Image (cartoon, rainbow, N blue to C red):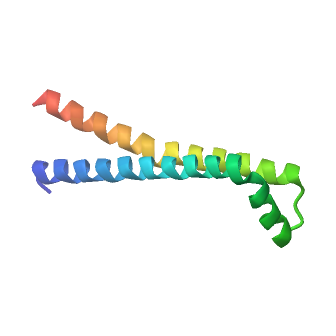
Amino acid sequence: MHKDELDNLLESLSAIFGTCFLLTYALLIFWFIFYLVGGDWGYKITSKWFEVSRHDYDLMSYFGIAFVKICNILFFLFPYLSIRLLLRRKKTNR
């Protein structure tokens, strides 16, 4: 693979990671707004399917949001930043 092809691949990967990071944060914002606005409605539906107390439903929501946020940072933001730093370093060394 030539240097230009590698740079293009890294640019594409960083764009993909950045887009995935932003889309996942949009999902988190939607989830949080749904929890704030429709928390009772979501609890009623969940409690029909499973025997869940309101406290357990709240914990599942908070832990779910935290888990998705941590995974988003680990799997999308860190690779994006490392690729961008690598590309910046390559451009300054030329």
- Left or right for 26, reference 55: left
- The vertical placement of 89 against 28, above or below, is above
| Residue at screen point 82% across, 63% down | 44
- Left or right for 55, reference 73: right
| Residue at screen point 50% across, 46% down | 25
- Left or right for 14, reference 55: left
Between residues 5 and 20, which one lies in front from this camera angle? Answer: 20
Between residues 26 and 40, which one lies in front from this camera angle? Answer: 40
Q: Return the x and y of residue 81 as percentages of the image width and height.
A: 37, 37
Identify the residue at the far top of this view: 92
Q: Return the x and y of residue 69 as percentages of the image width and height.
A: 58, 45
- The vertical placement of 41 against 17, above or below, is below
- The vertical placement of 89 against 74, above or below, is above
Which quarter of the rendering shows the C terminus?
top left
Q: Is residue 63 visible?
A: no
- The vertical placement of 22 against 52, above or below, is above
Q: Return the x and y of residue 41 as percentages of the image width and height.
A: 76, 59
- Left or right for 34, reference 52: left
Which quarter of the rendering shows the N terminus?
bottom left
Q: Can residue 22 be seen in this view?
A: yes
